[in-house]
Image (tube, helix red, strand yellow):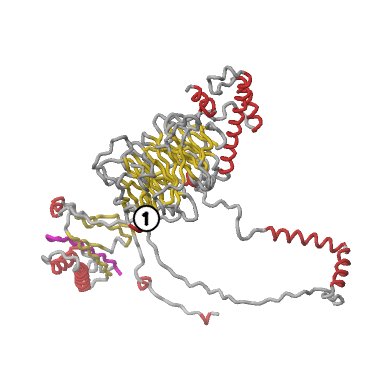
Amino acid sequence: MDDEGENEFVSEQVNEIVKSAITKTLGSAQYNKDRVSIWSGQIIDECLKELAKLNKPFKYVVTSIIMQKNGAPMHTGLALYWDTKTDGTSCVQVGNDTMDCITTVFAAMI
Amino acid sequence: MNEYEYIYMKKRKDFGRYCNFDDVECKIIGQIDRSPECGNMYVEQTILNLVLDNIADFSEHSVNTARVQTKSRIMIHTEGGWPKEVDYSEAQDTLKFRKRLEKDPAFVASVKQLTKQTVMCLEQNNTIDLFEHYFQLEEPDHLPENLTMKTVALFKDPSDEKRSVTKIGWHPEGPTKIVGSYSNLRFQRMTDEMPMASFIWDVNERNVPLTELRTTSPLICCQFNSKNSDLLIGGSYNGILNYYDLRKGPTPLYKSSVEVSHYDPVYDVVWLQSKTGTECASVSSDGRLLFWDVRKMSEVTDECLLTDGNKDEPKTLGGVSLEWMQEAGPTKFLVGSEHGITLACTKRPKKAVEIGTWFGAEDRGGYGAHFGPVYCVKRNPFHVKYFLTVGDWCCKMWMEELKGPMMQTPYYPSFLSSACWSPTRAGVFFVSRHDGRLDTWDYFYRMNEVSLSQKVSDYALTSLNVQAQGGFIAVGDAEGTITLLQLCDGLVDPAPNEKNLIGQMFDRETKREKNLEQIKKQSGAKEPKAEVKNDGITIDQADYQGREKAFFGEVGMTGDDLGTNLTGIKAASGGK
């Protein structure tokens, strides 16, 4: 707890990582239901890889939702029970013409 | 103790971080809103395919059951069980032993006990439920209320000019063929173009007749021979009899010679039963009853002039109907005359045919004659002494020994043309009417009213014949149509004991009629002068009622009106 500033969860930093992972994966792709699971796998892998490079004492949980834009509304929420001082979460929502992607990162300090 | 002590030392911080967990408020992390404009991307599906059924699903399954092994075994029964000292082959010994045993009180007790068990076993009915009621929904037989008959077939005269069906004859072997005689009986109404032929119909072929019977003058009556169904005898309008053999074609095989034939239309013809089966009798309105042998049609075998029996100036009575029945006596003939009187003729071998009774002739002490020709005379097939006649508007029931009718139907609104007894039910007869209806009387059920009245044709019914098995009736009308009707079972199957009960009823009526005759005689003796002009039918009302009551007491019946219409007959005869 002495070197707090260094090992803090910085959500802007994480957001950046997630955003780049999504854009890198989806780009301007058309929605295709057969590729959804591949995409979400790629996004999650990319995020975890980048987060690991930060070299911070955290364990990460990444979830990703890909949904076609067909007029239907969608809400996703979360409730947490953890160490509010150290742990952090960050959520990125990116959309293109045909689909929306919501990716959430949970980080718990070791 | 202290030697075994080992102390671990570690700083708190080296244990790792302790948990300090807290709840975090829920929060929405992602939100995609509804976009109504996306609805335009959708197209409504107009064709929907949906398959539904409500057929129960079944599965097939088969099981091989265990096979039952059967085996034949033999068992020998020998006498045994006797004590050693008794030789069972010696009757003396066994008897002795038995007697000794029967004296033993234990024997009686055990027999008593054993019989109880045995009787139960014997009385137990393991196989058949004798009292089970099968066919619960089946209607009881002979409900006289729902009698029916239905039209099975129509046979239309193929000729253009309308002729009436004057007689119908059934094939003697089963309901297969009908012979219909077609002619026009109205005086001088026959045109030159009128077809002459009569037809034989097959019951199963309605459109075309099986054979025609060619003749030079239309047949009025025609009958199958009961022994050989290929032979037919037909009486024609000009008085000649035609003898047909279907094996030889549709033209007559023989014709009777003109000199000896009738000189009026032959109204009725019957086959007689003889060894050769070739004898027949015919009757005509010329007042003669002629007997023939079809092997020699050039002469008559016998002849009877139908007169009223007056010795000084005999009046000839034209015959229009003829009845002969083997069971009633092969020598007896009943002839219905144009004058409403029915004649009973007897034909004894080597003797002239003589007329025995004039039923209904008033100058012979009878009463109740028909007001018009007697178109039909039929003996009851079960009680042959009794017969019915049809004339004017009613149907009368007679008995051979009585000069007046026993019973009669009420007067109909139309003329009657023919009648026929049911060959299977003693109390049933059918009457054809000129207004196209066929009436069924069931005397077993009721005598005061018709049991079934069925409209058969729009035209007058002219002839009627019931098939010998009783299930079918053929009815002919004035327009040349023969209607084949099938009767319901209630009209065919005899009710239990029907024959006897109808016989009893006829006997009762005969008794009553005789009783009345007696009163008539007595009252005639009392006031002979008053009886001079009247034919002896006036009866003292009080005396009559007294006698009636006594009669009913005698036959064991009670009630005021017993259904028979005696007063009606009296009035009818008295009114003349």
Numbered range of the magenta stretch: A94-110
In magenta segment, residue B301? no
Res A17 quadrant in image? bottom left
Q: Residue placed at 48% from the left, 35% from the top?
A: B342
Query: Residue B376 versus residue B110: which sits nearer the camera?
Result: B376
Q: Residue placed at 60% from the left, 23% from the top?
A: B544
Residue at far left of view: A28
**Whole-percent x, y for residue B243 in the image:** 37, 51
Q: In which chain is the residue bearing label 1? A: B
What crowding class fits label 1: few (fewer than 14 Cα within 10 Å), some (14-19), or many (20 or more)?
some
In the displayed structure, does residue B106 sit left or right of residue B383? right
In magenta segment, residue A103? yes
Instruction: Please name the residue that numbered disc 1 is placed on.
Output: B245
Residue at far bottom of view: B3
Query: Residue B526 versus residue B115: which sits nearer the camera?
Result: B526
**Whole-percent x, y for residue B306 in the image:** 46, 37
Q: Residue placed at 33% from the left, 37% from the top?
A: B185
Depicted B471 relative to depicted A5: above or below:
above
**Whole-percent x, y for residue A107 in the image:** 26, 66
In the displayed structure, does residue B219 sit left or right of residue B43? right
Depicted A71 relative to depicted B391: above or below:
below
**Whole-percent x, y for residue A14 in the image:** 19, 66
Q: Is residue B463 visible?
A: yes
Please state, as top left, top right, bottom left or bottom right, where the N terminus of chain B lies in the image: bottom right
In the displayed structure, does residue B108 sit left or right of residue B464? right
Query: Residue B414 versus residue B196: which sits nearer the camera?
Result: B196
Mark 1 residue type:
Asp
Q: Is residue B490 visible?
A: no
Magenta span: chief secondary structure: strand
Dot 1 falls on a residue whose secondary structure is: strand
